Image: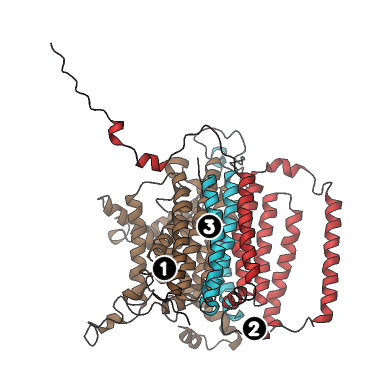
Amino acid sequence: MLENYLPILIFLSVALALGLLMLSLGFLFGRGSKTEAKLSPYECGFDPFEDARIPFDVRYYLVAILFIIFDLEIAFLFPWAVSLNKIGIAGIMAMGIFLLVLVIGFIYEWKKGALEWD
Amino acid sequence: MDEFLTILFDFLPPESIRFVVPFMKIIILLVALILGAAFLVFFERKVIAFMHQRIGPNRVGPKGWFQSFADVIKLFIKEVIVPSNADRFLFLTAPLLSLIPALAAWAVIPLNETFIIADIDAGILYLLALTSFSVYGVILAGWASNSKYAFLGAMRSAAQMVAYEIAMGFALVGVLMAGGSLNLGDIVAAQSGGILHWFWIPLFPLFFVYFISGIAETNRHPFDVAEGESEIVAGFHVEYSGAAFAIFFLAEYVNMLLIATLTSIMFLGGWESFFAGSNYLMNTSLEFLMEPSILWLAVKVSFFLFTFFWLRASFPRYRYDQIMKLGWKVLIPITIIWIGVEGVMFLANVGPWKVA
Amino acid sequence: MAFIEIIFYVFSSILVLTSLGVILFKNPVYSAISLILSFITSAALWLLLQAEFLAIVLILVYVGAVMVLFLFVVMMLNISDVIRTSRFNKIAPFALFIGLIIVGELITLIWIRSDQFSMTSSPISVLDTSVGNTTLLGTALFTDYLYSFEIAGFILLLAIVVSISLTLRRREGLKRQIVSEQVNIDPTKRMKLVDLKSEKN
């Protein structure tokens, strides 16, 4: 099994090398002068007067948390889907209950308005 | 392929064969991908031009075929600007973080029965993990640039990719239930026998959901709020120029190729022929059409790529709240319901599902 | 197999270095990225132990989801303020204390366990490698550990409810789009046809 992952390791290294090669080619051939206006962040002609890294809406955190929960759900579904033939009807019923519980949670989210963007 | 390469590198010490053979296959695939991405750009411009009733690029090479190469040369001789307020290290790492997962995902994609770089059991799981990793390129690019437009674009795209990844994951679960394996080669094998045996019929809603979330994942039109040139200029890569921008660009097009290939493999039978198992072609001069071949895969992939551009030319950009609504309130419920339907079909022994 | 040992030592050293990076970098974004890298290297180490499914799920869940949330939080901090504060603050002695407890626990655990199992024998031989790792895990999870699996489902439900009640703040006074109302509108009530008499000269 491990033998099959060796090409992936090689692939990751080759991809990294390709990216680094492209970047260094850019630095090698790219000519230009560095002026203050060129190096300042783009902002429609104004001088940037504050740090761009500003606090933002808490809604983004909620989306990220909900994403973690659903991602875990998917992580449970994957082994279930490939072992369907072995676990039989009991396994399908078990996943039915599990999904039902999560669908209740999903309906709760929906009704509470956690999925609205406004 | 493997045997050929093994014979070709016979002069090397035997221990090094297991490094050299995959390495050469990777190089072949990478060259194909980069050329594919280059012609994809040209294809996109020609398709859009055709839909706008224009000519499109027609100056470089015969009928403009070498346009992309001119663009690449132009990008590489442009200056790579690192803004003065930016975090220099992360600013230059971010493009690499979007390119590496886009390329490395191809390691588990089979292109015909024999050509695959890493034939692992958990192929689809690996793909989902790499897709989820690609969000970092966008987030870090937006944060490291220290520009308001870049930051806004990064945040938008992070929340969007996250929402569509769930729909994508659920759609993959449906494919797994039908295919019974995480290995993409096995999934194609489960679809053998003509157009009516492919998963797009029993899994039609998932096919639809998967392709739409694939478009959203790659930040393409009409879900391109991460770039949204009329709203936030160019979004997360507004500060990038020259080669650093070229890397983002390459990653985006390689990702499009990936989504198109995966959709073909999982729902349209991959390299299987449209006519496999047909009684009309049997024993005629057209029998060769029933053979599985990489060319069939190419036809299917080209169709999906064309659809990418077709959608781009046809639809206006979604408003951000509508994107989130489509992801959470339409696509995810459809996939959950269809997984339930598949479970019932499995119990009732209908469709491609068999109780062993 | 010597090559696997080399891989093991390379990944272990990266893991140690990135873990140190998590606590030593002054910039919290760099710390978060070190944490991501250490998750990836741990996944590689799990892979060396043949735990294929767990390794990829570690990347899928922790790198793909949990760390996105961490980065969201960390990016919102005012970086320049955070950097100006000293590297180790008042909590450091307490954190050190907790750390020592964990180290003690680990040592005890290994001590006890080493009597029961010989550490050198590999658990791989026990597994049936003809079917995939994921299938094996699925079969075990949905037969022998069914009860724990359902409990996990309820914990996830709890997590949904708690996270919503903690973070959901609906702003008042916003005009929201209600699609059903828009679609179900009666056009005759929206439009009035009026006959205007033409002006006479």
Residue C127 tag number: 2
The residue marked by circle 1 belongs to what chain?
A: B
Q: Name the residue under label 3.
A: A103
Color used for chain C?
red
Q: How many labels does the image show?
A: 3
Q: Are marks 2 and 1 on the same chain?
A: no
- Front residue of B336/A15: it is B336
What colour scheme does the image use? Answer: by chain
Residue B261 tag number: 1
B32 sits left or right of B14 in the view: left
Residue farthest toward the left in the current orientation of the protein: C201
- Give the Cα separation between the discs numbered 1 and 3: 32 Å
For marks 3 and 2, give the one nearer the viewer. Answer: 3
**Chain coloured cyan here:** A
**How far across and how far down the image is residue B100, in percent?**
54, 63
In the image, what residue occupies the spot 35% across and 76% down? B197
